[in-house]
Amino acid sequence: MKNVFLAFTLLALVLAGCAGDTGMNSTQKGALGGGALGAGLGAIVGHETGHTGAGIAIGAASGLLGGGLIGNQMDKQDQASTSQEERMRRQQEEIDRQRRELDEMRRQQGSDTYSRDRGYDRYDNRNDNRGSAAPSQNSKDPYY
């Protein structure tokens, strides 16, 4: 019974140490937590069967492997999520850039329309609003 208490105490200390942000990735955290949990469960099973040491070793190894695999999957999901967020950010930047270009084109088109309404096309040529660049007869422009 003393070994079981010792195993649970060790497990509690390891899990408490994992609780803070240690800079480990999910694979490492999963392996450490799984190994500790597996060692604790292995100690209980091993104690009941009379092989506490073997139970701890087998439980720790299987917990380490299982926790590492689960943590690895979590790391892959985090990486995919980060990659997706980056693609979405870049797409939003492109949308914003295109909106600015459209706004600028609309502004230019608006000023071109204003110039045509005054009788000039965008190249500052006199326009009689019939499609030709010839000056109109009632033009007050001294250059035409």
Image (cartoon, helix red, strand yellow):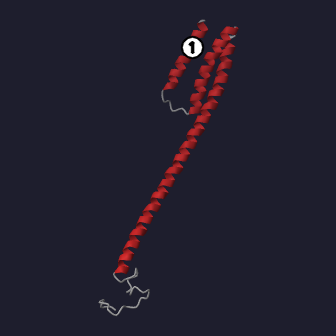
Mark 1 — residue? 8
Q: Residue furthest top?
A: 1
| Residue 123 position by quadrant | bottom left
- What's under tag 1, amino acid-wise? Phe
Q: Residue furthest front?
A: 130
In the rendering, at what x and y percent does residue 117 appear?
35, 80
In the rendering, at what x and y percent does residue 46 appear?
67, 12
**Of 100 and 19, the residue lying toward us:** 100
In the rendering, at what x and y percent does residue 143 appear?
32, 91
Residue beneath the point at 39% across and 82% down: 121
Q: Is residue 64 above or below residue 6?
A: below
Say left or right for 55 vs 15: right
**Of 28 and 87, the residue lying toward us:** 87
**Of 94 and 109, the residue lying toward us:** 109
Q: Quadrant of the N terminus?
A: top right
Residue beneath the point at 52% across and 25% down: 18
Residue beneath the point at 56% across and 39% down: 78
Question: Is residue 52 shown to the viewer in this render?
Answer: no
| Residue 33 position by quadrant | top right
Q: Quadrant of the C terminus?
A: bottom left
Question: Is residue 4 shown to the viewer in this render?
Answer: yes
